[in-house]
Amino acid sequence: MSWTTPADLRAQVQKLWDKGDLLRPLVQGEAMAPRRLRLVGPTSAELSERFDDVRVWMADLRQAGPASGAPRYRIVLREFRHRVLGANAVPDEVWLDTLEDALALIGKQKDAKRFASLVQFTCEQQPALLPWLEKRPLHALALVDAWPRLLAVVSWLQVHPRPGIYLRQVDLAGVDSKFIESHRGVLSELLDLALPLDAIDAGASGLSHFCHRYGFKDKPLRIRFRLLDPSIALLPDGCEQDIGVTQAAFERLDVPVRRVFITENEVNFLAFPPLAGSLVIFGAGYGFEVLAGARWLHTRSMFYWGDIDTHGFAILDQLRASFPQVQSLLMDKATLLAHAAQWGEEPQPVLRDLPRLTVEERALFDELRDNRLRVGLRLEQERIGFDWLQKTLAALAPGDGAALDIEDEK
């Protein structure tokens, strides 16, 4: 028997709650329009042939309805005639007439009351945020305890637009930097509604750019590098020339070297052998825009050493967007085949085309992407023999930095 049960009706109302449809009228200040619930009842044949089952079904529906003394749903009957029992009435429609009926049916009266209080508080403090409550009522309900503090942050930024201080310096009762950082997502949506356009940097998006978007100071980006030439030193004699500076400081350095190497692996960075007129930078994956402002780098020969896999070539391709002169190091087929015993697996290869690769690099990338050598093949940079690295570096000409043969994107 597939006739609608009281549990089915409650499930329909629960779906309305889960979509936020039962809370939105509280934001709009309007009564909920009556809603018809889906009702599947007995067919004409079943009414005649299974009348006892029909009576039990009808009794179950009425027991969960207004006859039980609790406002839940209204049953609309239609008349049918039984060949023996004569005229009878059977449920034909089920309606929710009020929001109170709907909430009582699924036991959400207390939650709705809390949400109504939240709406009233927002209306008094930050009416511009009411559209957010209407759009995300369940999200707002989950934040009910934090809501006053979230609005306090919004109000503070309205008074102090683009404050130019660290989050740690915001002085609000019950609000610390961890609170703001943990609620950056919702705060971004609220601030975009409540702040004037000139208080928002629209070009800075995403959680990692929260501070930039709303004018806070952010943790300075730092660049770490090692000087590989013993005759070049920025620190006192006897100190390891492993240096970390802010992005702004790095842009002003103009280190007297001819060649710059970039590697993604910290151990490779630390073990990179001495080399005249050179330094090595500890890279940071897909984040080379941090280096782009260092004009002096654009006049140096540059080499990128990454994993021999599709992601390694994707990083190389991205780096060339800022530094077209970059050459790959140890990312060739000869190195790959010489280290077959060290091959690993790349779980999610890059499938898009990479237009900034050289002819040789693109050929190897295509072999890896198309699984021609082995499915998901990769060779991590730290698995390449150190002697192989030393011989490769020794073979570099002193002024190595010839123009790259990069095909135009088709």
Image (spheres, rainbow, N blue to C red):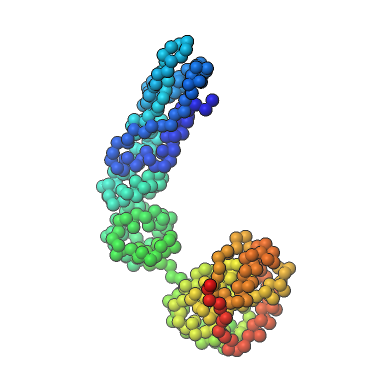
The answer, for residue 268, to whether it is visible in the render is no
Q: Residue furthest top?
A: 84
Reply above or below: 247 against 169.
below
Q: Position of residue 45 (x, y in %)?
A: 50, 20
In the visual, does 300 lie left or right of 187?
right
Q: Residue at x 47, y 10 (%)?
A: 84
Q: Residue at x 50, y 69 (%)?
A: 287
Quarter of the image where the N terminus is located: top right
Q: Quadrant of residue 343?
A: bottom right
In the visual, does 289 lie left or right of 146?
right
Q: Quadrant of residue 214?
A: bottom left
In the visual, does 341 lie left or right of 320?
right
Reply above or below: 66 against 260.
above
Q: Residue at x 47, y 12 (%)?
A: 83
Q: Nearer the viewer, residue 249 or 340?
A: 340
Q: Position of residue 312 (x, y in %)?
A: 59, 69
Q: Position of residue 282 (x, y in %)?
A: 55, 74
Q: Nearer the viewer, residue 407 or 37?
A: 407
Q: Residue at x 37, y 55 (%)?
A: 189
The answer, for residue 318, to whether it is visible in the render is yes
